[in-house]
Image (tube, rainbow, N blue to C red):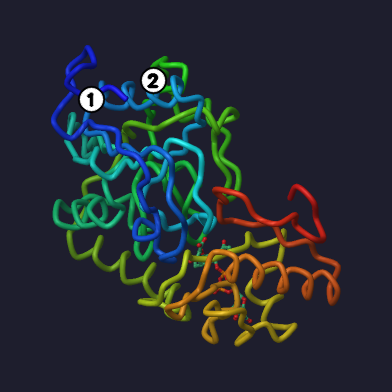
Amino acid sequence: MRGAAQYEGKLLGMDIVTRGRSLRELTTWGVGGRCAMFAAPVSRAGIFYAFKEAKDAGYPVFVLGGGSNVLISDEDIKAMVIHTPCCEGIEALSESGGSVLLKVKAGTSTKDLLDFSVSNALTGVEFLTGIPGTAGGAVFGNAGSAGTGFAEVLQYLDTVTFDERELRFDNASLNWCYRSCPFERSENILITEVVLLLKRSDRAEVAKMTRYFASLRSGQPIGKKTAGCVFKNPPGDSAGRLLDSCSCKGMSVGGAVISDRHANFVENTGSASALDIYTLCELCRERVFESSGVKLEYEIKFFGAFPQKKIFKGS
Ligand code: EPU
């Protein structure tokens, strides 16, 4: 494999590609095996370098942000993983008439973005309170709370595609559906920057809104090793309520257990494998289907190989 220094372009010192990197500590569940190739680029050239190395090796590319909404398999994975949190930073582009245009690099943590908005008295992203991960990952999964999310504040976003094109998407061209990726070709794209339009407000007001959004999460297992809600809410109902109503709370497989605070959360009590978590999720899914006929859909993303899903192949 070539070293970064031998690759033409303006690569920075950290723009290297390594092999056999463990992914476990890069996820909030704390599970997962190793990937064949790994890069944590800090520049655009570094991203393209990683794409090229993956292409040369014949590996698919997987983009990993904060690792807060993904289940990575225990077995080693033949892929290039691009870890985005090194591409971080927030910059005010302009301000007029009480509106501030903010450029946020995709690897910026949602907490840093929220803290920035509070300390600068900017309103619009309070919904991020309690949502872990990166800005890019949150946009990619259309994260939100109480019906609000990035659709309300995003102006445009910049991406690079795995075939090395740079594409800009205006908000209006994106398909904002509940907890689903707004891109059509989601598997071949990496978000590099999001540009948000926030409004000037009063600092106390912004802090008050964050307290409101925090209150919505008071029934969740904060501080535990989870990946947020595992399943999407079915139309008109709550996945947590459905799981709870068929006594899933407390169910466990190995070190994975359904939270006794909120049934849509799976906790890693310390020793869980990815397979434990997956098996537990499937057992609960079967229970809900048998008792109510509802097919719960996963909100989390999967990376790596998992056994054939028993009841809803391919969903
Ligand atoms: N409920 C139960 N038992 C449970 C959990 C919930 O009976 O174990 C009931 C609650 O009592 C309530 C209803 O179900 O009547 C809804 O529960 P909750 O208010 O906790 O909201 P949710 O629909 O479970 C959604 C999002 C959360 C978000 C909260 C607050 C999804 C899948 N979940 O949860 O998002 O934090 O609203 O805005 O959309 C996430 O996406 O990862 C996530 C945590």
Q: Position of residue 70 (x, y in %)?
A: 50, 55
Q: Which mark is residue 52?
A: 2
Looking at the image, do the residues carrying marks 1 and 2 touch, with CB atoms under 8 Å apart?
Answer: no
Closer to us: 10 or 122: 10
Q: Quadrant of ligand 1?
A: bottom right
Q: Position of residue 236 (x, y in %)?
A: 71, 63
Q: Position of residue 194 (x, y in %)?
A: 34, 34
Among numbered discs 1 and 2, the one appearing first in the sequence: 1
* The quarter of the displayed image where residue 296 is located: bottom right
Residue drawn at point x = 27 percent, y = 24 percent: 44
Q: How many marks?
A: 2
Instruction: Establish if 268 lies above or below 94.
Output: below
Residue drawn at point x = 42 percent, y = 58 percent: 68
Q: Residues within 10 Å of mark 1 (few under 14, many from 20)?
A: few
CA distance separating discs 1 and 2: 13 Å
Residue type indicated by callout 1: Gly
Q: Mark 1 or mark 2: which is in front?
A: 1
Q: Return the residue at label 1.
A: 3
Quadrant where the N terminus is found in the figure: top left
Residue drawn at point x = 62 percent, y = 85 percent: 249
Closer to us: 53 or 178: 53
Residue type indicated by callout 2: Lys
Q: Is residue 207 left or right of residue 241?
A: left
Instruction: Establish if 86 lies above or below 168.
Output: below
Q: Position of residue 215 (x, y in %)?
A: 40, 75
Secondary structure category for the residue under label 2: helix
Secondary structure category for the residue under label 1: loop
